[in-house]
């Protein structure tokens, strides 16, 4: 029966290895992107989280006169956060850790809207993990 302690140790090690693998599989996403479309317009946005800040970069060449960019809960839910006080093509903003954790845990539960004077949410799209391109 000397093999039993070794077997128990091996099982414990395997369990820890599986737990570590599962933890990395559900790790938070620090880069997000969205394909934006609507009203005949299109574009992309890429976001990343660094040091408690959410940074963004928009590429919306066909949208005329964007005024504001926001992240909403769901496709048409309430505003979770604003990407700057006024629309800027790129930038960073300090956000609460709780908000960033929610965003990182389930990016697909949020959408990005870009407003113009004529239309709120002129282009919009659901966030996904990883960066996007046109």
Image (cartoon, rainbow, N blue to C red):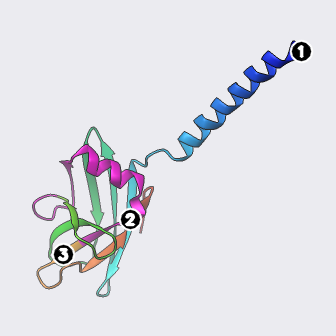
State left or right for residue 62 relative to residue 118.
Answer: right
Residue nearest the observer in this picture, 14 or 53: 14
Residue closest to the far top: 2
Residue nearest the observer in this picture, 71 or 46: 71
Which residue has dot 1 on it?
Answer: 1
Which residue has dot 3 on it?
Answer: 115
Q: Report which quarter residue 66 is drawn in.
A: bottom left
- The quadrant in which the C terminus is found is bottom left
Q: Report which quarter residue 69 is drawn in.
A: bottom left
Stretch of the chain drawn in magenta: 84-113
**Residue at screen point 34% across, 55% down:** 103
**Residue at screen point 28% across, 71% down:** 60
SS of the residue under disc 1: loop
Residue closest to the far right: 1
Magenta includes 89? Answer: yes
Dot 2 surroundings within 10 Å: few (below 14), some, or many (20 or more)?
Answer: some
Nearest to the eye among marks 2 and 3: give it: 2
Total marks placed: 3
**Residue at screen point 21% across, 49% down:** 92
Magenta includes 74? Answer: no
State left or right for residue 29 relative to residue 66.
Answer: right
| Residue 9 position within the rendered picture, expressed as x and y whole percent measured from the top left | 73, 20
The CA distance from mark 2 to mark 1 is: 53 Å
Q: Do the residues labelled 2 and 1 touch (CB within 8 Å)?
A: no
State left or right for residue 114 relative to residue 29.
Answer: left
Nearest to the eye among marks 3 and 1: give it: 1
Q: Earlier in the sequence, mark 2 or mark 1?
A: 1
Which residue has dot 2 on it?
Answer: 109
SS of the residue under disc 3: strand
- The quadrant in which the N terminus is found is top right
| Residue 99 position within the rendered picture, expressed as x and y whole percent measured from the top left | 27, 51
């Amino acid at each position: 029966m000397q093999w039993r302690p070794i077997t128990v140790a091996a099982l414990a090690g395997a369990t820890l290895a599986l737990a570590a693998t599962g933890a990395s599989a559900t790790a938070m996403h620090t880069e997000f992107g969205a394909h934006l479309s609507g009203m005949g317009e299109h574009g992309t946005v890429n976001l990343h989280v660094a040091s408690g800040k959410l940074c963004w970069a928009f590429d919306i060449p066909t949208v005329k006169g964007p005024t504001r960019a926001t992240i909403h809960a769901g496709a048409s839910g309430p505003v979770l956060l604003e990407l700057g006080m006024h629309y800027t093509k790129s930038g960073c903003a300090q956000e609460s850790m709780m908000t960033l954790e929610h965003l990182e845990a389930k990016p697909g539960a949020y959408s990005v809207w870009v407003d113009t004077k004529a239309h709120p949410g002129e282009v919009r799209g659901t966030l996904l993990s990883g960066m996007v391109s046109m």
